[in-house]
Image: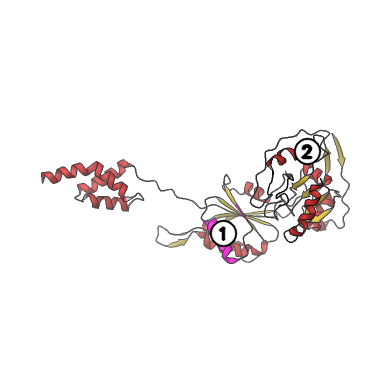
Amino acid sequence: MLIQPLRSMAMSPATILQRQWRLPSFTPTLISFTSLKLISLSPPLSPKYGALYCSTDSINHNSQESSKGGHLKPGLYLVGTPIGNLEDITLRALRVLRSANVILSEDTRHSGKLLQYYDIKTPLLSYHKFNESQREQTILKRLREGDIVALISDAGTPGISDPEAKLCVDENIPVIPIPGPSALVAALSVSGLTNNEFTFVGFLPKHAGSRRERLTISANEATTQVFFVPPHKLHQFLEETSSLFGDTRVCTNGLSIDLNSCRRCVIAREMTKVHEEFWRGTLGNAKEAFSNHQPKGEITLLIEGKEISVVENPSESQLENELGALISKGHSLSMAVKLVAEGTSMKRKTIYSLALRKFGKQLEAEDDSN
């Protein structure tokens, strides 16, 4: 194994990078392996806003990298990049970025800082939602000719709340995921909220009506809801969620209280950066805490799911006891059924059938004797 120190970053001043990234305090090293054991990967799932895969077989077989660790097969590589701290990048990601013929990025100036830090000379080409239709044919041509094309986002894993990678639609072009950092997973892992199931919403629609519709759906889901919130829209987000999440109930003292604001939330800000912060509390607390100031930096906001109360139906023996008690007090069969049905969510027809089966013959005998 050969350890080669990377050349020092030639930037002035260094604080330019620190505004966007959290820089490590030591000179990084790149570890090259003379041999790398391949791990056979299952076909990646296509996310809602991710790559549209055309050929499962081509991804399984053609996307495998050489065991020598230097040569890559042609195709489109979706490369995860740091969400803040420049150390949060894999050796494999660095190798792909160095080996690629071109790197597609949302913001070439932003991504250029990452490449400069790791002394990667691969050309950058801007690729975002405003120019993807114009760029698509040029990129497809390069992929057909056997180029290695890497796609990165400004931060995290491309294809998640980013322009869709539609490059292989109707084309037999391999799409290879290079896993890396994700703000979604990072925030969820430290949130303290239920994370065995969750709903990733991402950025909300700009239109007020569409936004309210989406929030109404989220408010009634039992899973933890995960949002990406721009800092300048945090106050608006907390105002809207405080009024939509939860319901109004009555306390034991007879006073009506609003439990909308009692839903727990976590505000993860500037994760992995110098000013990383995790704010925890209720939506009501958050609304109050951030009412007078606007935080800076990227925000991932999580809200706990709605508590679903499960009402258990009474057992047949319980129903029989209640019906019997009412009938013994002089109530008719139909009245006893009505009173019992009012106290449960069971269908009246079901209770009436039970009453006939248990007390029908007894009542008929009493009528005959009278």
Q: Is residue 318 left or right of residue 296?
A: left
Picture quadrant of residue 65: top right
Q: Is residue 181 left or right of residue 3?
A: left
Q: Residue 214 carries which label?
A: 1
Mark closer to the observer (1, 2) = 2
Looking at marks 1 and 2 on the same chain, the residue that comes earlier in the sequence is marked by 2
Please provide percent x and percent y for residue 291. 61, 65
Please provide percent x and percent y for residue 26. 82, 46
Q: Give whichever of 157, 294 is nearer the camera.
A: 157
Judged by its main secondary structure, the magenta piece is helix
Callout 1 touching callout 2 (CB < 8 Å): no
Pointer 2 residue: 65
Let me know if residue 88 appears in the view: no
Q: Give whichever of 278, 330 is nearer the camera.
A: 330
Q: What element carries label 2?
A: loop
Residue with the most extreme left position: 370
- Residue 173 is a magenta residue: no
Determine whether 240 is above or below 55 in the image.
Answer: below
- Residue 212 is a magenta residue: yes
Identify the image's colour scheme: rainbow, by chain, secondary structure or one colour. secondary structure
* Amino acid at dot 2: Glu
Q: Tell me where the magenta segment starts and ends, as one range.
A: 200-219
